[in-house]
Each structure stands twice: as C-alpha cells, then as structure tokens.
Image (tube, grey):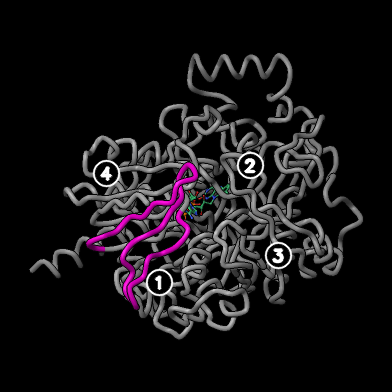
Amino acid sequence: MTRISADYVVVGAGSAGCVLASRLSEDGAKVILLEAGPPDRHPMIHIPAGLGHLIMHPKLNWNYTSEPEQTSGNRALMWPRGKVLGGSNSINGMLYVRGNAADFDSWSQMGCKGWAYDDVLPFFKKMESYEGGEDTFRGRSGPLPVVDYDTILPATRLFVEAAQEAGFPLNKDYNGRTQDGVAYSQMNRRGRFRAATASTYLAKARKRPNLRIETRAHATRLLMSGRKCTGVAYTQNGTEKEVHVSREVIVASGTIASPQLLQVSGIGPASHLQSVGIDVVHDLAGVGANLSDHYVVRIVHHVRNLITINELQRGLRKVREVIRFFATGRGALTFGVTSAQVYCNSREGLASPDLQLLFTPASYVIGKFLKFEDHPGVLAAVCPTRPSSRGTILARSADPNVYPSIRPNYLSDPDDVRVMISGFKHTRRIFGTSAFARHNVSETQPGPDVNTDDEIEHFARTMGSSLYHPVGTCKMGTDPNAVVDPRLKVVGIDGLRVIDASVMPYTTTGNTNAPTIMIAEKGAAMIKEDAQLSAN
Ligand SMILES: Cc1cc2nc3c(=O)[nH]c(=O)nc-3n(C[C@H](O)[C@H](O)[C@H](O)COP(=O)(O)OP(=O)(O)OC[C@H]3O[C@@H](n4cnc5c(N)ncnc54)[C@H](O)[C@@H]3O)c2cc1C
C-alpha cells in the first residue's frame, strides 16, 4: 500500500477541482489533486468544434445514462460527464453564463448565508478576464478568458433580428446589469482554443512543487476516523493507494460522483445505504437527493439561402474552415454549440427570467445530438431554467466502480410542463416572424402536427433531452436535507467539504459551468480563512 501525505486532497479535477487545487496551493500548502481520467492531451479537447468527438468518447467521458422514467418517455437518456483533467469543462459547449442575480439572492434566502449576489459578484469578477461590459459587473484580469463570438454566421444574426421583432430587446451583456432579452453568446476561449479550468488555472499552478497532480487515480473511499475524514483511498494503475491529510479532504467529483463517493463511504441516507450493503458511518438524508437538471426540447427548421454549420462541416467548405482555423484562429472551428440566446419569462409578473432559448446555426438528425442534417438547418433549444422537479443519484452497490442509478424525474412537476410549453410558444413566435420567414423552408421538428398544449407536452416528454447541467445532490443549506453548510463543510463530519456543482441548492438561470467555478473560488477563499483562524 502506497501512502502519501498532504495538507489538502482534492478529489476530482473538473471545473471546480482545478480551481481549488490552484488556489489552495498558491500559498505553499501541500495539495494533492486526484483525477480518475487521463491528462487533457487529446487535440479535440482544445479545438472548440471538437465537442462532437467528446460527447460520447469512450475514454474521456463517463458516459452515464439515466434510468428510463415514465415522465420522459421511458427512455434511458445520455448523461455525458468529462473523465479527464478539466472534467466536464474539458468536454463542454464553452458557453459562459453566470446566472441571474436573483438566483444567488434566492440561495441566500434559502439559508445559504454569504451567497447572495452581492457576496458572489466579487468571485465572478475575480475568476474572469473579459474586455466588454461594465467594470461594475465584469472582471478584467482573472485566469479564465471570456470572449464574444468573433465569427457570427448570418443565420445567427437572423435569429437575433427575429427575436427582436418578436419583442425581445437586444442585450449587449447578459452577464452584466441585466440578463433579459436576446444576446450573442460569450464563451471560454483563449485565442482559438478552449479555455477550461485545466488549461487556465491548473496550467499555471502545476509548476508549483507543493502541488501534485495524480491522473488515472480513481478515489474509491473516504478514510474515516469516527466522524472525522482523514484521507482518501484510491486506485491507480491497478495499485491501491492512500492520501492522508493534515487539514481537509475536498470532494469535487461533480453532481453524480460526489454523492456516490460519500454514499460508498457510509455517509448518506441510512436506509438506502443499508439496502445496498454499505455500513453507515453518518446518516445524512440529503446525500444524492435534490437532483435538478435542465431538460430541453429542440425546434428545428429547414432553411434556405443561408450557410449553416451543416454545410461548413462537409467537403471543400470543411477544408477551408480547417485552414482558416489554423491560419487566422477564426471561423466555424472556434464555435461552441450556442451562438445566441434569449432569456425570457414564462408568464407575466416574474421578477427574473425562467426560460433560456438557445440558438444553434445547425440542425441534427432526429434524436442524434451533433449528427448534422444534409440540408441547411437551424434549431433552438427550449430550456426551463429553474425547474421544480427533483430526482436522485443513489449508489447501487458498495462497489465504487458500479455506476449509481440516475433518476432525474424530468417534468414531474406540472409547473415545469407549463414553463416548457410557454418557452416552446415563444420560440415558435420567433421562428414565425417576417425576418425569419425570408429564409424559412419548414419546421421539421416537431413539425406542423404539434400544436395543442397536450401535443407539445407529449413532444417534450418523448423527444426532450438533458442539457447536461445536473446540480444539487449535496446541497448547501441549513435545513434537514442539507449536505453541506454555507461554508461547504459536510454536516456532522469534520475535515470534509464538498465543493462543486452538487452543492447548488437550486439551479441557476443558464448553463452551470461559470457558477461552479465561482463556487470553487469562494470555497477556496473560505478554506483559507478557516485555516488562518485555526492557526491564530
Ligand atoms: C457535454 C456537456 C456540455 C456542457 N456545456 C456547457 C456549456 O456550454 N456551458 C456551461 O456553463 N456548462 C456546460 N456544461 C455543464 C458544466 O460543464 C458543468 O456544470 C461543470 O463542468 C460541473 O463542474 P464540476 O466541477 O461540478 O464537475 P466536473 O467538471 O464533471 O468534474 C468532476 C471531476 O471529478 C472526476 N471524478 C469523478 N469521480 C472521481 C473519483 N471517484 N476519483 C477521482 N476523480 C473523480 C471526474 O473525472 C471529473 O474530472 C456542459 C456539460 C457537459 C457534460
């Protein structure tokens, strides 16, 4: 048995884990970062348009699937998660969305003291480097580059024009003063390449002698001494190893693997743990509960007199785009998936938007994400951003190698169906404008036979998919279902924190990478404050 020691061990080198390892090691503390996947060397990680190669990659992706559930057409849905340095941030769509100020104010109202928008804004500013927007809201010199799309296809301009005709005002910075309206997307890119937390935060920190990064290192169990967590057991190249810490263990394995690691270590809902043969160390009901995800349906149009990504990724045009990418750092290979978005309300009187409509200047073969159609096409994904439906992540076995069961329970709350139907109608209204009509051939999905609310609901249940934003399974709070307190310490256990997307008590209005990085920045600052206090 190999035993190593450190001040801190961070389990999982994803969006959050790379930030934590970087910040905790900057003052000389000895930090070990464990990552189950390999280093981030695959070229498709770094070329933004490489997402299609990563979404089901057998080695860089955990390739989870959800349990078939009646609420979403009894289908097992694809749940990709990055298994590589950088985690899901190394395989994601790179869209940069902080969320709405009201999201964080509501966290605070739910008992997460210190997480209101005014509290988290300094961390959003600290983490990013962006040239646009207002100084009050935007950071200029953080490790994470944020850029506007610099190659905008006419199809995207058309969508933005059509959205304005449909009544949504143009918003120059949806990460600034207000989120509402239609906007061109911002993304995480440095020059022509993906900017993930591994290639930004960690790339700089990895030269420090006090930071050790272990890849292909799968954490199998938390080491406990009574109610104190003292380290982590892991396997690497078939060898069992242990890290023992003098300060803290930080679990940053993401919304699926963090609750699973706690559960297989005996921390979780006692009755479930016992039912799958796990000895209970600490009965904590909320571990794996409160699962929330963004579920979307896509409206697809066949268009004319427009070049869409469908054409740019074929034949001579593809060759031209590849040359353009390497020669100028511009063009279709620098795109993420979503080039424009609308934030809007499902009904009158809401204080902040509960819908995000995500536009892509491409269309996919029915049911095949990122498999492009043969004719020019565009699509918009309808996403209720603050769903009320809740699901679970539960270990099936004491064996950490057995994937847990994923039950998202999509559209189980009737209000989520109402919001989805409203978003569907907003999107059809945009595609029904005179601006868009000039280029429209027909709506190919769901097509003209889907009109009534019941038909839209049926379409959503049978054709919808995850937007890959699960959160909430180790939620922060002060109620009986909280897993971590507002300082991200696991309730009832010493020496253990969870810091990643799983601690969000409620999901945010938009994509979840930026708020996860913010959580890691704030979490690292709290760990340092607490270490300082205990040293004095
Ligand atoms: C395909 C896809 C597209 C997305 N697109 C966007 C987007 O465009 N914009 C956006 O904002 N968000 C997007 N997201 C969501 C966003 O990437 C996630 O919310 C975010 O990365 C979550 O960060 P995390 O640190 O919680 O988890 P992760 O980044 O998933 O990190 C967890 C890490 O822990 C490792 N790990 C797990 N178990 C163990 C173990 N037992 N031992 C050691 N290591 C372990 C994993 O391999 C992984 O590296 C997308 C996600 C996916 C999958």
Disc 4 residue crowd, few under 14, some 14–19, many 20+, Cα 10 Å: many
The residues bearing labels 4 and 1 have C-alpha atoms spaced at a distance of 35 Å
Q: Residue drawn at (63%, 71%), measured in percent from left and top?
A: 391
Q: Which residue is labeled 4 in the image?
A: 211
Q: Specify the principal SS of the magenta part.
A: strand
Q: Which residues are magenta?
A: 219-247
Disc 2 residue crowd, few under 14, some 14–19, many 20+, Cα 10 Å: many
The residues bearing labels 2 and 3 have C-alpha atoms spaced at a distance of 25 Å
Which residue is at the front of the view, 132 or 330? 330
Q: Earlier in the sequence, mark 4 or mark 2?
A: 2
Q: Which residue is labeled 3 in the image?
A: 420
Which residue is at the front of the view, 292 or 263? 263
Q: Amino acid at mark 4?
A: Leu
Q: Which residue is labeled 2 in the image?
A: 55
Residue at the extreme right = 449
Helix, strand or loop at label 4? It is strand
Task: Give the image location of residue 523, x and y in percent.
Answer: 31, 61
Task: Give the image location of residue 288, x and y in percent.
Answer: 54, 71
Q: Which residue is labeled 1 in the image?
A: 105
Q: Is residue 143 above or below residue 415?
A: above
Helix, strand or loop at label 1? It is helix
